[in-house]
Amino acid sequence: MTLNVLDVSNHQARLRLADLPKLDGAIFKASQGTDYPDAYFEGFVKQARDLAIPRVGAYWWVESHLPVKPQLDVLLRKIEPHLPGLGLWIDWEPRNPERVDH
């Protein structure tokens, strides 16, 4: 089975989900690192829920050079009002693949 799922971040700030073909799901950027909670996350989640998109998720862009715990704290503050019913995805892209700090 193939699903039509969209990955969205602040780069698509003006996107209206209602203008798209029927979606099976959507994943929205919630935060990146410790200083970037995505300002468009809440609006996209609201759009998805208003359209009754069956699978709605958040993704967290982990900054591999920073400690994970403070980043996770930012993410949890951002997504907590939208729980339960929100899937969680992690985008891990090490800056230096030879060395990853935890």
Image: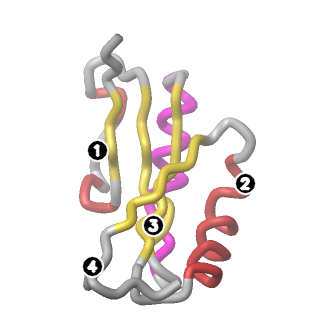
Above or below residue 18? Residue 7 is below
Q: Which mark is residue 15?
A: 1
- Residue on which disc 4 sits: 97
- Looking at the rendered structure, the secondary structure element under dot 2 is helix
Q: Amino acid at mark 4?
A: Pro
Q: Nearer the viewer, mark 3 or mark 4?
A: 4
Q: Is residue 81 above or below residue 37?
A: above
Residue linked to disc 2: 81
Q: Earlier in the sequence, mark 3 or mark 4?
A: 3
Distance from disc 3 to disc 4, alpha carbons, whole Å, reads 25 Å
Q: Earlier in the sequence, mark 1 or mark 2?
A: 1
Q: Earlier in the sequence, mark 2 or mark 3?
A: 3
Q: Which residue is mark 3?
A: 38
Which element type, helix, strand or loop, lies under badge 3? loop
Task: Please state the extent of the stretch shown in magenta in the rendering.
Answer: 36-51
When the figure is inspected, residue 37 is found, relative to residue 65, above or below; the finding is above
